[in-house]
Amino acid sequence: MLFTQDRTRTRQLFRSTWKKYLEGQNLEPLEKQIADLLQEHPEYHALLTGKETVVDRDFTAEDGHENPFLHLSLHLALREQVGTDRPAGIASITRSLLLKHGDGHTVEHLMIERLGVFLWDAQRQGRAPDEQAYLESLRELL
């Protein structure tokens, strides 16, 4: 999918996709997914269209800034997980959360918060994320 070790290229993809969307250009399937997601996040529009160079900017919690590119990437990763039901059971959990909360975007935010923690922890420990622990964490939201 979109996930690459090249932070600059990933960020440029978000910016160029939003520009293409605003100009009414045809979008590739991944760009369509990104544009749909960006429409749900108007708080990032100025960042993506502004003259400020954000592709090399560090966003740190210490500075009080959420990393918008990480946030958006987590949304895309979660949508891919749900679409492929990998880890097995995540699609069912998502449907149950949708019934409970009624709003897909709210549900995604609850879920990506958990996803981010599990990815950060796995990276910190130098191991693959524990899918079963991740699913159990998501079930706690039910």
Image (cartoon, helix red, strand yellow):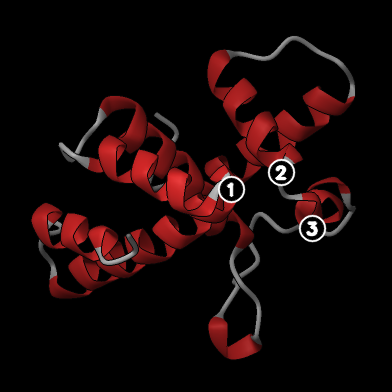
Q: Amino acid at mark 1?
A: His
Residue beneath the point at 45% across and 52% down: 100
Residue beneath the point at 45% across and 33% down: 2
Image position of 135 with respect to 125: above or below:
above
Residue at the bottom extreme, as displayed = 62
Location of residue 92 in the rendering, given as x and y in whole percent from the top left corner: 27, 38
Which corner quadrant holds the N terminus? top left
Residue on which the image places disc 2: 40
Residue beneath the point at 54% across and 57% down: 71
Residue on which the image places disc 3: 43
Q: Secondary structure at mark 3?
A: helix
Quick one: 81 or 92, which is closer to the camera? 92
Please tell me which of labels 2 and 1 falls first in the chain: 2
Disc number lying in front (3 or 2): 2
Location of residue 59 in the rendering, given as x and y in whole percent from the top left corner: 60, 72
Contact? badges 3 and 1 (CB < 8 Å): no
Residue on which the image places disc 1: 105
Q: Secondary structure at mark 2?
A: loop
10 Å neighbourhood of mark 1: few (<14), some, or many (≥20)?
A: some
Q: Amino acid at mark 3?
A: Glu
Contact? badges 2 and 1 (CB < 8 Å): yes
Disc number lying in front (3 or 1): 1
Name the side, left or right, on which 45 lies relative to 54: right
Q: Amino acid at mark 2?
A: Glu
